[in-house]
Image: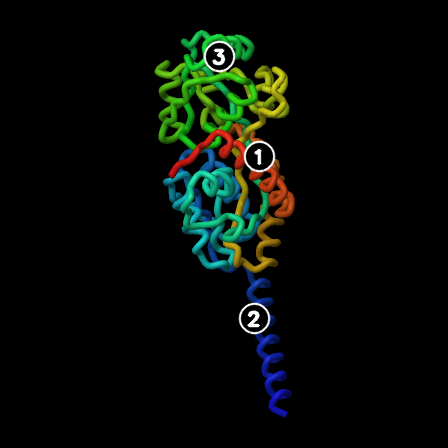
């Protein structure tokens, strides 16, 4: 009899739990969402979040509030979201650094991307581009490559910092093209871009969203794209693949993630809404104008993409002996 009573009580508790969960999921969302960005306001990541977040707000009928928590290569933001409640009301802009680089560059990290986050889908990406100062004398990719091969270690190339997608793209380019350059890491891409435009550095590995206005105005000269195909916004700029370096493909990319404890049906709702937002014609045009390529995918496709990227870039980091500890 006691066993039957315990079994009945357990079944009632389980039913109550499921009923409560279903009601919660059915009513989601019933409050504003917080979208955490690990970079300062005004940058390419921030623009992507605010543009997509505005469309998500219209679709969900709730405000989507972007909260910038910059610092330490988005580690501060990542740790914050990893510890946030898994209720579907906190989401994270999850990029290369958040999901791949940081855990390979640091021995001690207070979050583990595969354990702490559930991925919802991709949003956008942009190839890295080698650009030149107008006074540098570089005008095309072939002359750049000839100069680098002819004078190993002579030419300086600026990046947004050690361990950034820009730096790792540069390491990949050096390895595959068998060239050697002087890496000049900055604390962020904005100052590097200012120095490039001012002629203080001759070359820079640039992501288009950070420098699209400088490129359009002719203040910097795009020379070589780290992409499989030519960039639609820069149709005259050849790819590394065209120069014979098929393995040189590098992007800065952005997806959306939530704490791993977020209920599966809430994850699925957010993933579907994200894909819908990324397919909106107005959103896609705004991203294109800002240098992004809209890349709407579901959670499964993003997980597969991240797995491939993880294998590629962790191997490069290890082979080039790069560490931030």
The quadrant of the picture occupied by the N terminus is: bottom right
Residue 190 seen in the current view: yes
Return the disc, 1 or 3, that comes first in the chain's sequence. 3
Q: Secondary structure at mark 3?
A: helix
In percent of width and height, residue 103 lies at 47, 43
Q: Which residue is mark 1?
A: 312
Q: Which mark is residue 148?
A: 3
Are the residues flagged by discs 2 and 1 in contact, CB closer than 8 Å? Answer: no
* Residue at image coords 59%, 35%: 294
CA–CA distance in space, label 2 to label 1: 43 Å
Residue reaching furthest to the bottom? 1
Q: Which comes before the other along the chain, label 3 or label 2?
A: 2
Residue 214: name its quadrant.
top left
At a point 47% along the width and 17% down the height, the residue shown is: 180
Q: Is residue 219 left or right of residue 291?
A: left
Residue nearer the viewer, 287 or 190? 190
Residue 77 at x, y = what percent? 41, 46
Establish if 24 lies above or below 73.
Answer: below
Q: CA distance from mark 3 to mark 2?
A: 64 Å
Numbered disc 1: secondary structure: helix
Q: Nearer the viewer, mark 2 or mark 1?
A: 1
Residue identified by numbered label 2: 20
Work out whether 237 lies above or below 325: above
């Amino acid at each position: 009899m006691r066993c039957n009573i315990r079994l009945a009580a357990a079944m009632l508790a389980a039913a109550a739990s499921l009923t409560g969960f279903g009601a919660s999921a059915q009513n989601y969302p019933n409050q504003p969402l917080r979208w955490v960005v690990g970079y300062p306001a005004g940058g390419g990541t921030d623009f992507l979040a605010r543009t997509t977040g505005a469309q998500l707000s219209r679709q969900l009928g709730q405000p989507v509030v972007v909260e910038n928590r910059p610092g330490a290569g988005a580690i501060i933001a990542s740790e914050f979201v990893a510890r946030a409640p898994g209720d579907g009301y906190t989401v994270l802009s999850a990029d290369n650094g958040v999901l791949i680089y940081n855990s390979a560059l640091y021995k001690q990290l207070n979050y583990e991307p595969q354990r702490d986050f559930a991925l919802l889908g991709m949003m956008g990406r942009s190839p890295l581009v080698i650009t030149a100062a107008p006074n540098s004398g570089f005008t095309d990719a072939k002359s750049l490559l000839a100069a680098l091969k002819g004078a190993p270690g002579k030419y300086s190339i600026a990046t947004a910092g050690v361990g950034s997608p820009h730096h790792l793209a540069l390491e990949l380019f050096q390895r595959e093209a068998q060239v050697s350059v002087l890496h000049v890491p900055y604390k962020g891409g904005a100052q590097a871009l200012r120095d490039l435009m001012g002629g203080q550095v001759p070359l820079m590995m640039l992501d288009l969203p950070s420098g699209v206005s400088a490129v359009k105005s002719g203040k910097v000269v795009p020379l070589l794209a780290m992409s499989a195909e030519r960039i639609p916004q820069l149709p005259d700029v050849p790819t590394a693949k065209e120069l014979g370096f098929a393995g040189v493909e590098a992007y800065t990319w952005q997806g959306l993630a939530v704490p791993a404890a977020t209920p599966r049906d809430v994850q699925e709702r957010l993933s579907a809404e994200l894909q819908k937002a990324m397919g909106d014609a107005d959103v896609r045009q705004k991203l294109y104008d800002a240098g992004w390529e809209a890349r709407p995918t579901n959670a499964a496709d993003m997980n597969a993409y991240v797995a491939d990227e993880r294998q590629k870039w962790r191997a490069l980091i290890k082979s080039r002996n790069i560490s931030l500890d």
